[in-house]
Image (cartoon, helix red, strand yellow):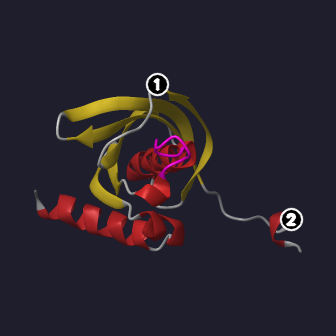
Amino acid sequence: MGNAMKESLAFGTSVLQSQPFSVLLGAKLVVFAEGHAEIQIPINDQLKQQHGFVHGGVISYAADNALTFAGGSVLGAGVVTSEFKINYLRPALGDCLIARAQVIHAGKNQAVCRCDLFCTDSEGERLCATSQGTITRLGSPSAENTQV
């Protein structure tokens, strides 16, 4: 890994670690390069729903954040998710949840990204969900938006 990639990953990791919810889930950014991001979350009992599967909210969180990191890798640090959809394909079971996102298309102010989510165990990876979202660059707040 080159210095620029290491610096990018270090920056992305610091952003992720500044999010209290990400820290609570134990999320780790393992890839942050132009057009790509990967977040991993160790699966524990506190992240499961009543049937023993990873809760859909955790899967949605992973998709949302990976999409935003991928979009931010091409748009810059000041970005938010403006919309996303998710399809749950099978129950999420295993040791680790992996969210791999990539930019499909980027313009000046927004990027459309895709994220596939996998669960891993001793037998390998299984696709459990897929999502797509639009990541938007934050603009400068106008005087109208700063009034309380």
Q: Quadrant of the C terminus?
A: bottom right
| Quarter of the image where one finds residue 17 | bottom left
Looking at the rendered structure, the kind of residue marked 1 is Leu
Q: Above or below — where is 63 with respect to 79?
A: above
Task: Please report contact status of discs 2 and 1: CB closer than 8 Å, yes or no.
Answer: no
For image coordinates 17% across by 40% down, the residue present is 122
Q: Which residue is nearer to you in this view: 18 or 48? A: 48
Tag 2 residue:
144
Q: What is the crowding at mark 1: few (fewer than 14 residues within 10 Å), some, or many (at least 20)?
A: few
Q: Residue furthest right?
A: 148
Please identify the quadrant where the N terminus is shown: bottom left
Mark with earlier residue (2, 1)? 1
Disc assigned to residue 40? none
Instruction: From the viewer's perspective, tell me whether residue 50 is left or right of residue 1.
Output: right
- From the image, state whether disc 2 or disc 1 is nearer to you: 1
Q: Does residue 53 show up magenta in the picture?
A: yes
Judge by depth and name the residue closer to the eye, 43 or 104. 43
Say what secondary structure mark 2 lies in: helix
Residue 122 appears in the figure: yes
Magenta span: chief secondary structure: loop
Relative height, residue 99 to residue 18 (above, below): above
At horizontal 40% and vertical 46% (from top left) the residue drawn is 70
Crowding at mark 2 (Cα within 10 Å: few <14, some 14-19, many 20+):
few
Q: Which residues are magenta?
A: 48-55
Residue holding disc 1: 89
Residue 21 appears at what percent x and percent y? 52, 66
Provide the secondary structure element on which disc 1 rests. Answer: loop
Q: Residue at x 23, y 41 (%)?
A: 121
Amino acid type for the residue under numbered disc 2: Glu
